[in-house]
Structure formats: structure tokens, C-alpha cells
Amino acid sequence: MTPLSAEARKWGEEMVSHAAFFHGRGWVAGTAGNLSVRPPEGPVLITPSGRHKGTLSIGDLVAVSSEGSPVGEKGGRPSAETSLHAAIYGSVPKAGAVYHVHTVESNLVSLWAQDGGVGLPPLEMLKGLGVVGENPSARMEVFPNWPEVPKIADEVVKRFGEGGFDVPGFLIRLHGLTVWGEDPAQALHHVELMDFVFRYLVLERQTRERGKVFQVPGPSGGP
């Protein structure tokens, strides 16, 4: 891989650590998932195609341009979903990391999309995703899982042009969650927060289907 600046290496090592964390949670089983970072200096670093995310090292990462083309010394093959990362970097100037994981709950929630999205509950966790207010309202965009990944990327770019996203992430039907952040730490936080929201949605639906009353408390704590 192309020699890296100290800062780029730090970002890459942080991403490798997050990949191992995601694997430990069962969010990138097998060779699933892909992560990238765009350090302030240097190329985008992305996980290689077909590699286990729990055993990566900094030397396994592949350097690509913000448009997704390999740069520098020849290394491994970049993720097959590099075009999705490029779509986000091209649309979000402040994006410094893009993480794509396959959680069970994100796949379940993706099946509930209506008109291309899923409404999110007014949880406190939404504040960490940039949605504020006493009863925050937000929608998670859901895209079809086209076999041709660039086709999904084109739809993501189109959605950015049509007004963007309520939260820094989106779902692909039965194909997991993609988030972005200004740096690796923020991207990690966004994955964790969205996972919490999705688990809440799944449990809330299970509760309703069992015939139990489930009410969101008012500002005073009462119903």
C-alpha cells in the first residue's frame, strides 16, 4: 500500500479496530460489510474485497481516490461496494468515514419501508444523529438492493440532490446499514445509535403484535 502519513495511519488503524468490534458484535459476519476512511491528508482507505473483518491489519487496506479508483502502489482489490462510499464522499464534503454493516435488525426494518423509507421513533438517541426537538421526527431512507452496486450508488446521489437525508445513514433492503461521519469515531457512534433505534423498532413491533399496550410517555413522564 502507498506510504501513509501519521494521521492517515492513525485513522486506518482506528477503522481496523472498529471492523474487529463490529465482527465481535456479529454485524459483519463472514466477509460481509465494508468500511472506509478519508483522512484529511492522503487517499481514501477502504477494506479489501472478500476479507474477514475481524482479522484485518493496516497493511490490508486499499488506497483509492474519493471517486473510488485505486491509487498508488498496487494492493488488494477494494470492496465491491466502493461506489457507495464514493457516492457519499462526493455528496458530503465533511464525511471522513463510511461504514457499512449487516445487522439483523437493520435487515428486518428495511422490509417495513413505505414510499422508500421508514419513520423513526422519537427517541433520545436521535439527538446523536443530529435530529433535535421535544418529539424529534426523522425518516430512514431505504433503497432497493440492485445487483449492480453502482445503480444503488446512483440512487443515493440522486437522493442527496433531492434534499438529502434526515440522518447520516440509509438502509438497503435486506442488505444492511450504511452510515457516515466526520471521522471514524463519529461513524462508529452512528452505527451504534442506529442499531439501538432498529432494535427498539423490532421490539416495539413484537410488543404490539402480542396485543400489549405500548405508549410513548409525554413530556411529564405520563401517558
Image (tube, helix red, strand yellow):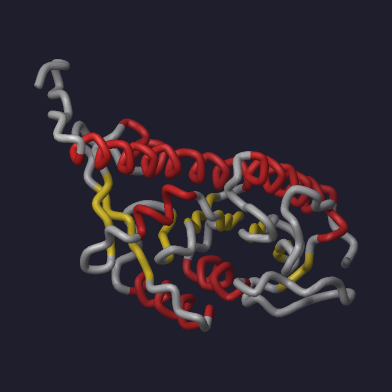
The answer to whether 112 is drawn above or below residue 204 in the figure is: below
Give the x, y percent position of residue 155: 40, 77
Residue found farthest to the front: 210
Q: Hey, which quadrant is residue 188 in on the image?
A: top right
Q: Residue at x 24, y 37 (%)?
A: 122
Q: Residue at x 79, y 61 (%)?
A: 61
> Could you say which is closer to the camera, residue 176 or residue 206?
206
Left or right relative to 116: residue 35: right
Left or right relative to 57: residue 24: left
Give the x, y percent position of residue 158: 37, 77
Q: Residue at x 64, y 53 (%)?
A: 29
Give the x, y percent position of residue 194: 43, 44
> Could you say which is closer to the camera, residue 215 or residue 219?
215
Give the x, y percent position of residue 121: 25, 41
> Could you say which is closer to the camera, residue 70 or residue 23?
23
Quadrant in which the N terminus appears: bottom right
